[in-house]
Image (cartoon, rainbow, N blue to C red):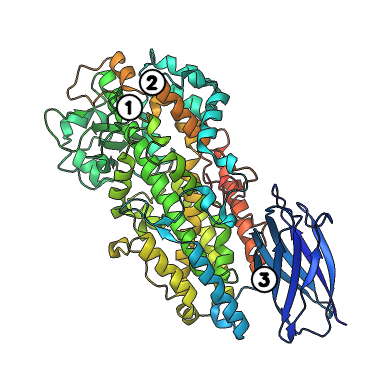
Amino acid sequence: MPSYTVTVATGSQWFAGTDDYVYLSLEGTSGCSERHLLDKPFYNDFERGAVDSYDVTVEEDLGEIQLIKIEKRKYWYQDDWYLKYITVKTPMGDYLEFPCYRWITDEKEIVLRDGRAKLPRDDKTQILKQHRRKELETRQKTYRWKEWHPGFPLSIDAHSHSDLPRDIQFDNEKGIDFILNYSKAMENLYVNRFMHMFQSSWSDFADFERIFVRISNTISEYVMQHWKEDFMFGYQFLNGCNPVLIRRCTEIPKKFPVTMDMVECSLERNLTLEEEVKQGNIFIVDYELLDGVDANKTDPCTIQYLAAPICLLYKNLENKIVPIAIQLGQKPGPDNPIFLPSDATYDWLLAKIWVRSSDFHIHQTVTHLLRTHLVSEVFSIAMFRQLPAVHPLFKLLVPHMRFTIAINTKAREQLICECGLFDKANATGGGGHVQMVQKAMKDLTYSSLCFPEEIKAKGMDSKEDIPYYYYRDDGIKVWEAVKSFAEDVIHIYYESDEVVCEDVELQAFVKDIYVYGMRGVKASGFPKAIRTREKLAEYLTVIIFTTSAQHAAVNFGQQYDWCSWIPNAPPTMRRPPPTEKGTVTIEQIVESLPDRGRSCWHLGAVWALSQFQDNELFLGMYPDEHFVEKPVKEAMAKFRKNLDEIVNTITERNKNKKLPYYYLSPDRIPNSVAV
């Protein structure tokens, strides 16, 4: 009688093993095997990290094995099991791989196909077509869309992390408990003694060092020493944690009436302001989105304030970007003066602090939350709903969706919910952050997620004109490497544009993103369908780049580097913006900055939100072998080689730099949005 050797690999996560009864059935083109008991309780099989082998004898040849059914039956108590993969050695000596990488919970069963990726057109037998259809029907019942707030991209229909499907939950929920992590962070930083001292101001700038010392590093110490200087203020628009707002100014806005007389002493080329604009030396950052957003009112004892400033910057003869004019409101007038470097020291300093605070709010809520977290969740839900596990695009994308839905669900549960942790220290808490996302949706376009296109649209693409824009330089390198990888995979499975058009699952995936993620807004520019391999490569690059590189670029700089020195990134302001010049004092600035309690909660936040996950997987690392074909593995090896070259280039450039830029170094880019 024919005999098959079956090898079963159990995951290495905590509690991944099982003591339950486990049964296996093989289904081939010529018939189906009987149900075989592989493991009984306490036989020490299927333990965490184990690889177990069994001989399965059948009465007659089954033909080509198409499906494997695994059943788990409870022995005593609920005992989830993480199955990595199964391999089958046939009587002819051939090896078949059946990737799983899923949890089997309760008394459930799963049916696996072999690991060769297949498009819908490749399935010829009814049994495979039916398996494909049933998998998607089940997933669509499990992964449901839900509106969290009007106007937001839709998110997962789950009230808490525990409501999520087991396959997308964190392995250890305690590891992403924001309340616990914030408290631990403040304890580790020795700032917990200040955490309840709301309404208690710091004495002066030096007083902030009392909570800074434990979080400092080379960059943050440099920031602390130089944060008041104009070059440091300007540098952060290029290479700080929010390097996405600066754009080349082609015309001075009427709402920002800067004149030549105001800025003449800041210009270095003996040109008029208009001539400097024409030569491309003037840049602008406009925080208009904050205009009209309600400030946090959750603490009646502390009035908090927001501003919507406009900042004009200049590229000087040293090619440094420096500020030359700041207006703290959108409507010009006598009570909204334009602050200048030639003004009194504290006037100019407070104006810059207001810009830095506004930049913090846009960074946290728009750049970070909306444009990486919420968008990546849309990609994740659509993938699970419309692409079966056998689809090559599911295999390509699933590593880049790891824990994304889980981290966002946890954030909605504890962090950005009503009365959540976000309210404790942020001036946009208490609902302001919701208004910001709703307003920012009009600018969330497909082209704005295409990295090179967005850089060019802002007039920031010239390396010759703007030589120190490392976010741009590194981002384009990583974008091109991802795009090349996507193209290689596409050409393995899609032999022509016609095959792309015929892929109904791909088209349903794209439509889900447009209809539910972008709410069917035509102006978003998100495609409703993909018709060519070229467009598909770009689309997949947008997804992978957003979930990995873009998130890394705007998330991990929060930690030690740019946000730990409170005056450089104030999460709230406790005095209104100045309405006249010549009245600002150092006491007024300190009283405007966050109090001791809010400063500590802020530090706990930037620390907890910018830690790598335990066992983090970085870009190009694919330990779960969803793909089994040699050409794809060769494409992965080429991708990793390209990424290694980028790492070497960035490492070499950063040598001896006081302000190294490494957020887009591939060895520091996690595969997915998981923190």
| Residue 493 rendering spot, x and y as whole percentages | 57, 75
* CB contact under 8 Å: marks 3 and 2: no
**Split into 4 quadrants, where in the image is the N terminus?**
bottom right
Q: Which residue is mark 3?
A: 115
Q: Mark 3 and mark 2: span between their CA atoms?
A: 57 Å
| Residue 510 rendering spot, x and y as whole percentages | 43, 68
Is residue 104 in sight in this rendering? yes
* CB contact under 8 Å: marks 1 and 3: no
- Indicate whether 37 appears above or below 180: below
Lower sequence index among marks 3 and 2: 3
Looking at the image, the residue that sits furthest to the right is: 1
Q: Which residue is mark 1?
A: 299
Q: Which mark is residue 198?
A: 2
Lower sequence index among marks 1 and 3: 3
Q: Is residue 211 left or right of residue 317?
A: right
Give the label, 3 or 2, closer to the camera. 2
Q: Label 1 amino acid?
A: Asp
Is residue 465 in sight in this rendering? no
